[in-house]
Amino acid sequence: SASGSFWLQGCALLWLGLPALSGSIRRCFPGGSGRWHRLVGAGLGAALCAVPVVEKQNSASLSNDALIKRAVSLVTDSTSTLLSQTTYALIEALTEYTKAVYTLVSLYKQYTNLLGKMNSDEVDAVWQVVIGARVDMTTKQQEYLKLESSWMTALRLSEMAAEAAYQSGADQASVTARNHIQLIKSQVQEVRQLSQKAETKLAEAQTEELLKAQGEESSLPQGILGSTDAGEDPYLRED
């Protein structure tokens, strides 16, 4: 290497200059010039050869443009990692929510099929199970909505990083970040569509249960349904 070449040249120059140095030693220390020649020469040679020679660095690698591109590449990598992690958590939460919705759909259908075939105690028992499933579904819905907020923040950060990479001329980092964003969006959209389909099924099951329950009530004798006072608010009667 260049540093190794400088090192060897320094050593050679030192040894070439030793005769003049040895003359001075002989004048200062008569009678012991041979021994001092060997000691001093070896010591100074080792000292000079141990001095590192720094090569001139390439100034292009330290230019403002190069440093900005390097920094923005690190930013796109970091935001992509954040987006991937939040996406994984959101998809998992959406999947759990969708499962909870379908569980409630199944319970509503079972309840609807059993209307008119159960006594009041059995109706209450089944309805308690339905209520428990609704609470579970609501809890999972709140969880995925919270994660969705974090995901939206990560998505915006990633989009901003991709734009910064484009503006700074880091084309490869910009393209990679934008492709990752598109992939993430498609994955989340696919899971969202599944959850929306489940919600549609739930609305249909609830409507079916309500209509059948109203039909069962209308078929009961008036004495069982109970009479309504003439002066009662009609809106309360509807409820």
Image (tube, rainbow, N blue to C red):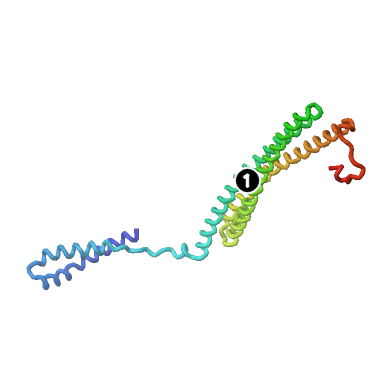
Question: On the rendered image, what quadrant is the C terminus found in?
Answer: top right
**For the view shown, which residue lies furthest in the right direction?**
230
Question: On the rendered image, what quadrant is the N terminus found in?
Answer: bottom left
Q: Position of residue 49 (x, y in %)?
A: 26, 62
Nearest the viewer among 46 and 217 is 217
Q: Horizontal placement of 199 versus 68: left or right? A: right
Among the 4 quarters of the image, the one containing residue 42? bottom left
- Residue displayed at 52% across by 59% down: 71
Q: Residues within 10 Å of mark 1 (few under 14, many from 20)?
A: many
- Residue displayed at 15% across by 63% down: 39
Among the 4 quarters of the image, the one containing residue 187? top right
Residue at disc 1, secondary structure = helix
Under mark 1, the amino acid is Leu
Q: How many marks?
A: 1
* Above or below 21: residue 163: above
**Circle 1 sits on which residue?**
90
**For the view shown, which residue lies furthest in the top direction?**
117
Nearest the viewer among 23 and 92 is 92
Q: Position of residue 105 (x, y in %)?
A: 73, 35
Q: Horizontal placement of 141 versus 169: left or right? A: right
Q: Position of residue 55 (x, y in %)?
A: 37, 63
Nearest the viewer among 170 and 164 is 164
Nearest the viewer among 69 and 1 is 69
- Residue displayed at 77% across by 36% down: 205
**For the view shown, which residue lies furthest in the left direction?**
31
Q: Position of residue 176 (x, y in %)?
A: 58, 52
* Above or below 199: residue 46: below
Q: Is residue 32 visible?
A: yes
- Residue displayed at 63% across by 47% down: 184
